[in-house]
Amino acid sequence: MEITWWGHATCTVEDSGVRLLTDPVFARRLAHLRRRRGAPPPAHAAVADAVLVSHLHADHLHLPSLARLAAGTRL
């Protein structure tokens, strides 16, 4: 199993050829919130077999970031 943290609650969990992305936020700013460290995740971070959104707060369910996912990605 490999886990890559991209910032805040966004991470990729890979195991047995399956890639799960959690709470994708690919923006520098989100309303009054901003990234404290590093740049937004690279484009390849949006490649996933499935996405887990933990809850409906804007810093976990970011619609512009979800729009960057490939068509057919399971949510």
Image (cartoon, rainbow, N blue to C red):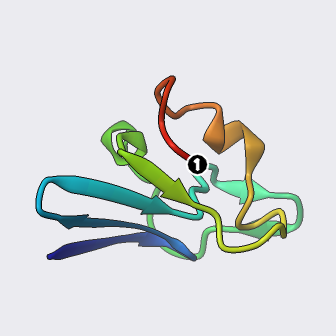
Q: Can residue 40 be seen in this view?
A: no
Residue 31, given in percent of the width and then of the height, sits at 88, 59
Residue at which label 1 appears: 75
User: Who is closer to the viewer here, 63 or 75?
Assistant: 75
Residue 21, given in percent of the width and then of the height, sits at 43, 59
User: Who is closer to the viewer here, 11 or 49?
Assistant: 49
Total numbered badges shown on the rendered structure? 1
Residue at 70% across / 66% down in the picture? 60
Q: Can residue 58 be seen in this view?
A: yes
Residue at 64% across / 32% down in the picture? 67
The crowding category of the residue bearing disc 1, from other C-alpha atoms within 10 Å (few below 14, some 14 to 19, many at least 20), is few
Viewed as shown, does residue 42 lie left or right of 16?
Answer: right
Residue 45, given in percent of the width and then of the height, sits at 36, 48
Residue at 14% across / 76% down in the picture? 1
On screen, residue 75 above or below 44: below
Given the image, on which type of amino acid does mark 1 rest? Leu
Of all residues shown, which one is farthest toward the top?
A: 71
Residue at 63% across / 50% down in the picture? 27
Identify the image quadrant of residue 4.
bottom left
Residue 41, given in percent of the width and then of the height, sits at 43, 53
Identify the image quadrant of residue 36.
bottom right
Q: Is mark 1 on a helix, strand or loop?
A: loop
